[in-house]
Image: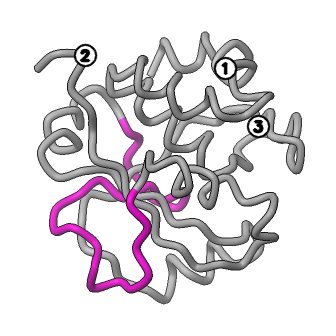
Amino acid sequence: MHESQKIKLYVLMLEECDPDKCTANKLVRFGLVKPLRRLKEVPRGCIVLNPLAEDYLSIKDREIAFQRGLLAVDCSWKSVQNFFNNVSIKGHHRRLPRLIAVNPINFGNPHILSTVEALAASLYILGFKDQAEELLSIFKWGSHFLKVNEKLLERS
């Protein structure tokens, strides 16, 4: 597998945030992720980013992500626990390490990442650094995310 290959990215769009500030909406507009509107659209066997999962995402998940894709759920942090406790998404659920958000809404807060930050961190951990940088490049603050979290991401 070459770095030039890309992981298929999916976002389950729950539309709970301000559409103008939603990083997932911008990723969709730029054609960098495939938006999903219903649970039955989620690809079978994909990696599901879930902050409540027991297992951490690691390089060991690279092949699954490459074959099946990576799913982020775009919802409000206020409803994330309720969502994952009440909705069953089939796939390999993984959490991210405790990273620092640099997005304008949650700047400096540990673990409260935007959708683009979660996807970029995942890509970086899985060894797809160019794809992570591509996602972040469409945000003014994007490049700072990798700089701020570089040590944690390199250890994962």
Q: Number of numbered discs present? A: 3
What x and y, as percent, mark residue 98?
64, 36
Tell me if residue 123 comes above or below residue 148 in the rendering: below
Residue ID for mark 3: 101
Near mark 3 (Cα within 10 A), the count class, few <14, some 14-19 or many ≥20, is: many
In this rendered view, identify the residue nearer to me: 109 or 17.
17
Image side of residue 119 versus residue 103, left or right: left
Image side of residue 151 versus residue 144, left or right: left
Q: CA distance from mark 2 to mark 1?
A: 21 Å
Q: Amino acid at mark 3?
A: Ala
Image side of residue 127 versus residue 124, left or right: left
User: What residue is shown at x 47% (from left), y 58% (from top)?
Assistant: 72
Q: Amino acid at mark 1?
A: Asn
Q: Considering only order in the chain, which callout, 1 or 2, is on the residue closer to the N terminus?
A: 2
Image side of residue 94 versus residue 81, left or right: left
Q: Nearer the viewer, mark 2 or mark 1?
A: 2
Q: CA distance from mark 1 to mark 3?
A: 9 Å
In this rendered view, identify the residue nearer to me: 55 or 109.
109
User: What residue is shown at x 21% (from left), y 26% (from top)?
Assistant: 5
User: What residue is shown at x 69% (from left), y 19% (from top)?
Assistant: 143
What x and y, as percent, mark residue 142?
70, 28
Near mark 1 (Cα within 10 A), the count class, few <14, some 14-19 or many ≥20, is: some
Q: Considering only order in the chain, which callout, 2 or 3, is on the residue closer to the N terminus?
A: 2
Q: Secondary structure at mark 1?
A: helix
Q: Amino acid at mark 2?
A: Glu
> For the N terminus, which image quadrant?
top left
